[in-house]
Image (cartoon, rainbow, N blue to C red):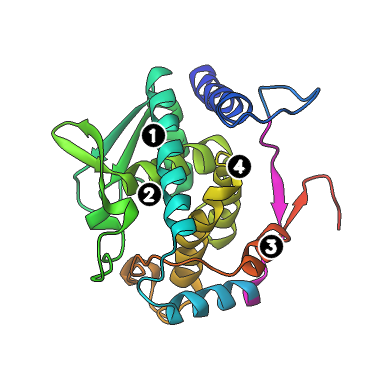
């Protein structure tokens, strides 16, 4: 139990360092151990259905210089966070077995905190097909190679999500947990990265749970096509409005 508590404390410390130093943010008198306060999500399924429908209608590729910069900032911070967790003694390894590497979010959290090792299911096996309109920014090689497998930027992005959103913050794999984990992940990036983050995490999560295949059992449900486009700012604002401080009874 002590080792597991220590692993979570180390992740909180790494997150705090990244936010206060790498992003240059200052939190006044707040402890540098916990700049990422937990929040309670009020899940709005109408919002989730709207996001899913917008993702479904969106073109495979509608890029702009601002959106491509958003992806570049996302990739840069994923690499910084990956290097920090490796320096702290965590391993991120490709998973080559049949099926997902963890039964559920509890299994993920218990195994990672006990072993300091995260298994990542390769993008080709765990995510939808890339667009055929050109290379996806996150489907490019990251330069990180483990056990003769070169992680894509998408693999590192999902590893950051799992380590900080699910292991550190303790959120589950359901729609509410995935959205809450993405809120935590988002606070590890500057605001310029949020449009790409929203498309990649909130857009795809809502499509998976509330999109055209929602009646299919989750184990057989397809993953969404990985598109390149930005949601209107109104969606990002609505997402921020789903969260309340944990002590807020409203």
Asked if the residues shown at circle 3 and circle 4 are in contact, with their CB atoms under 8 angstroms apart, the answer is: no
Label placed on residue 103: 2
Q: Secondary structure at mark 2?
A: loop
Label placed on residue 79: 1
Instruction: Give the residue drawn at x 34%, y 67%.
Output: 223
> What percent of the width, then of the height, locates residue 160?
44, 40
Instruction: Give the residue drawn at x 42%, y 41%.
Output: 108
Q: Secondary structure at mark 1?
A: helix
Instruction: Quote the CA–CA distance across marks 1 and 3.
Output: 27 Å
Whether residue 163 is visible: yes
Instruction: Quote the CA–CA distance across marks 1 and 4.
Output: 16 Å
Residue at label 4? 187
Instruction: Quote the CA–CA distance across marks 2 and 3.
Output: 33 Å
In the displayed structure, 4 sits above or below 202; it is: above
Mark 2 or mark 4: whose residue is earlier in sequence: 2
Label 2 Cα neighbours within 10 Å, binned few <14 / some 14-19 / many ≥20: few
The stretch drawn in magenta includes residue 209: no
Label 4 Cα neighbours within 10 Å, binned few <14 / some 14-19 / many ≥20: some
> What percent of the width, then of the height, locates residue 36?
66, 36
Q: Secondary structure at mark 3?
A: helix
Residue at label 3? 237
Instruction: Give the residue drawn at x 55%, y 53%.
Output: 194
Looking at the rendering, the stretch of residues picked out in magenta corresponds to: 35-46
Label 1 Cα neighbours within 10 Å, binned few <14 / some 14-19 / many ≥20: some
Instruction: Quote the CA–CA distance across marks 1 and 2.
Output: 27 Å
Mark 3 or mark 4: whose residue is earlier in sequence: 4
In the displayed structure, 189 sits above or below 20; it is: below
> What percent of the width, then of the height, locates residue 134?
25, 65
Mark 1 or mark 2: whose residue is earlier in sequence: 1
Instruction: Quote the CA–CA distance across marks 2 and 4.
Output: 27 Å
Q: Is residue 196 left or right of residue 137?
A: right
């Amino acid at each position: 139990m002590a080792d597991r508590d220590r692993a979570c404390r180390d992740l909180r410390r790494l997150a705090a360092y990244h936010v206060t130093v790498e992003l240059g943010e200052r939190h006044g008198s707040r402890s540098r151990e916990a700049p990422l306060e937990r929040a309670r999500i009020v899940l709005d399924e109408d919002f989730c259905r709207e996001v899913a429908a917008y993702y479904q209608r969106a073109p495979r590729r509608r890029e702009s210089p601002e959106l491509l910069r958003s992806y570049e900032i996302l990739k840069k911070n994923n690499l910084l966070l990956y290097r920090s967790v490796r320096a702290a003694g965590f391993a991120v390894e490709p998973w080559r077995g049949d099926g997902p590497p963890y039964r559920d979010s509890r299994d993920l959290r218990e195994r990672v905190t006990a072993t300091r090792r995260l298994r990542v299911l390769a993008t080709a096996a765990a995510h939808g097909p890339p667009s055929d309109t050109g290379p996806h920014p996150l489907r490019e090689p990251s330069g990180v190679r483990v056990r003769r497998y070169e992680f894509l930027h998408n693999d590192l992005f999902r590893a950051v999500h799992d380590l900080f959103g699910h292991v550190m913050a303790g959120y589950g794999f359901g729609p509410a947990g995935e959205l809450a984990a993405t809120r935590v992940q988002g606070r590890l990036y500057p605001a310029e990265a949020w449009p790409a983050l929203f498309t990649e995490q909130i857009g795809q999560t809502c499509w998976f749970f509330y999109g055209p295949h929602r009646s299919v059992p989750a184990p057989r449900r397809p993953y969404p096509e990985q598109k390149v486009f930005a949601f209107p700012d109104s969606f990002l604002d609505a997402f921020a409005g789903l969260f309340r401080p944990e002590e807020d009874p409203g």
